Image: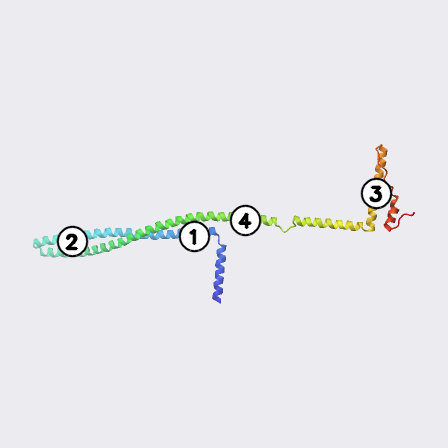
């Protein structure tokens, strides 16, 4: 159970860390790693090539030493032959021993030369391989650099698209703001209008409403009479006089259900 929990926590941490990483930083980190690997490879290749160059110098010295020993051994043998011909036994022994000593050095030099030749052949192959590896890795690094430019361009495009998406989302949120809509306002106005009209209708159905309506009619009639009076003073042709407002008792009688006396 503990192992499962630990694996879950580890996976959760890695997922969270992965999501929190900036792609641009990840790209730069990958390029820096590739550059470091390329530099390390170049350093190793330089050591391989340097080893081959060093073997070249040793090979030249060993060849010179072997050639010189061979010539000296020949000279010692000639001296030994000359001493032998002159009957100089001691001289002959001396030069023969010298020739033997030089021959031993010559053999060692030739053995060293043979060993160095084999080492040089291996070093030459390794140097060639190192050069090829450096060239191939350099090409990979160039490809990574080109890929870096491409990815950075795609990243900028993604950021621009995200910014546009955020702007569109913001505009959508502004339009769909939870404030009152026009339809809600219209319904509210219509409801208030209907309530006002209902109150007016109910008021007219009451005695107070009827009285107010009657008073309004009387006021209109009186205003019309005043206008006719002013027209007469001005000499303007007037219409027939409006009925007198003394009809109030009759209206009240009709309202109580009593008709006029015969």
Of pointers 2 and 1, the one earlier in the residue sequence: 1
- Which of labels 2 and 3 is toward the front? 3
Q: Which one is nearer the viewer's eye here, 190 or 72?
A: 190
Q: CA distance from mark 1 to mark 4?
A: 29 Å
How has the structure been colored for display? rainbow
Identify the residue at image location x=22%, y=55%: 114
Identify the residue at image location x=59%, y=49%: 172
Of pointers 3 and 4, the one earlier in the residue sequence: 4
Q: Secondary structure at mark 4?
A: helix
Q: CA distance from mark 2 to mark 3?
A: 159 Å
Q: Is residue 25 left or right of residue 126?
A: right
Q: Is residue 116 left or right of residue 180?
A: left
Q: Which one is nearer the viewer's eye here, 178 or 254?
A: 254
Residue denoted by label 4: 165
Q: Residue furthest bottom?
A: 1
Where's residue 28, x and y in %? 44, 50
Q: Secondary structure at mark 3?
A: helix
CB-based contact (under 8 Å), mark 3 and mark 1: no
User: Residue 73 — which label?
Assistant: 2
Q: Secondary structure at mark 1?
A: helix
Where's residue 84, x and y in %? 9, 54
Residue denoted by label 1: 30
Identify the residue at image location x=22%, y=52%: 63
Where's residue 245, x and y in %? 87, 43
Residue denoted by label 3: 219
CB-based contact (under 8 Å), mark 1 and mark 4: no
């Amino acid at each position: 159970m503990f192992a499962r929990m630990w694996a879950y926590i580890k996976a959760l941490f890695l997922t969270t860390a992965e999501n929190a990483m900036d792609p641009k930083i990840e790209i730069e980190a990958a390029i820096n790693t590739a550059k470091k690997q390329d530099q390390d490879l170049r350093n190793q290749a330089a050591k391989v090539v340097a080893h081959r160059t060093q073997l070249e110098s040793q090979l030249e010295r060993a060849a010179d030493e072997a050639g010189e020993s061979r010539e000296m051994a020949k000279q010692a043998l000639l001296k030994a032959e000359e001493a032998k011909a002159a009957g100089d036994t001691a001289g002959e022994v001396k030069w023969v021993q010298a020739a033997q000593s030089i021959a031993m050095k010559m053999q060692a030099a030739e053995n060293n030369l043979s060993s160095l030749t084999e080492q040089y052949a291996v070093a030459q192959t390794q140097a060639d391989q190192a050069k090829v590896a450096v060239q191939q890795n350099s090409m990979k690094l160039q490809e990574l650099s080109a890929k870096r430019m491409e990815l950075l361009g795609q990243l900028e495009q993604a950021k621009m698209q995200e910014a546009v998406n955020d702007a569109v989302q913001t505009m959508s949120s502004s339009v769909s703001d939870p404030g009152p809509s026009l339809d809600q306002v219209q319904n509210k106005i219509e409801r208030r209008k209907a309530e006002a009209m209902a109150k007016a209708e109910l008021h007219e159905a009451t005695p107070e409403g009827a009285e107010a309506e009657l008073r309004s009619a009387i006021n209109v009639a009186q205003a019309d009479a005043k206008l006719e009076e002013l027209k007469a003073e001005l000499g303007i042709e007037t219409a027939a006089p409006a009925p007198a407002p003394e009809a109030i008792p009759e209206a009240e009688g009709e309202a109580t259900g009593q008709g006029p006396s015969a």
